[in-house]
Image (cartoon, rainbow, N blue to C red):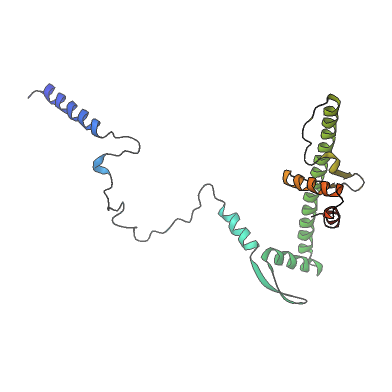
Amino acid sequence: MNSGTTDRRRARLISGRKRHYEVGYGKPPVATRFQPGQSGNPLGRSKGSRNSLRPSLNEERLKAIILDEAYRTINVNDASGPITIPMAQAVVRSLAVSAAKGDQRAQRLFTQLLASIERDNKHLHDQWLETAINYKVEWERELGRRKKLGIEQPDPIPHPDHVVIDMQTGSVRITGPMTKEEKTVWDLLQESKEQGTDLWKLLNRDPD
């Protein structure tokens, strides 16, 4: 038998196999596939091996551990007796007590922590004040434009009239609804006020 005949037979055999089963991604060769009831690791886990403690790439396990420990409650002795507080609070309390007793290192650390927190709070306050001012100014300008052109569209929520800014103290208060759901309740209360019912009195007594 010459080599040409052998090659043709081999080609027909391969072609016949392709018609029945095509090997590719997700389709391993039949001979190497796991059979039903057959373990992929018949020898079991190798001796001395253990589950990996390495976190996945999308995990920040150390942060989670620190937070769990920071807010785990512990029992401490207070002037009024034993109390239960989070670990973080106990650490800060211990630091503050040491600072009050004259520990200069504790005093520096406590002062730095306090200054950092107050600085962050001031930054958040300034951002909130700037956002409220821009919101009020831009929407007052837009509502004026709509009125001038006779455009009828739903009012924004919250309405700029409900954004009350005290420039002397830098405080911002929202005196109206903040969401569509609150707007629905607000409209019902406004209607009850016009009808002279007691719902409006209840709102004035307890805005929440």
Q: Is residue 200 above or below residue 163?
A: below
Which picture quadrant has residue 148?
top right
Residue drawn at the location 88% of the way across and 44% of the way down: 165
The spot of residue 139 in percent (x, y) is 82, 34
**Residue at the far front in the pictured view:** 195
- Measured as percent of width and height from the top left, residue 92 is found at 73, 64
Q: Quick check: 20 left or right of 147? A: left
> 158 or 206: nearer the eye?
206
Residue shown at the point (56%, 54%) measured from the top left:
61
Furthest residue toward top? 4
Q: Nearer the viewer, residue 169 or 194?
A: 194
> What residue is rendered at 87% in x and 51% in y?
196
**Could you tell me residue 29's position as x and y percent?**
27, 39
Depth check: 142 or 69 in front? 142
Q: Could you say where residue 152 lies in the image, as x and y percent from the top left?
A: 79, 30
Within the image, what quadrant is residue 162 found in?
Answer: top right
| Side (left or right) of 113 relative to 173 | left
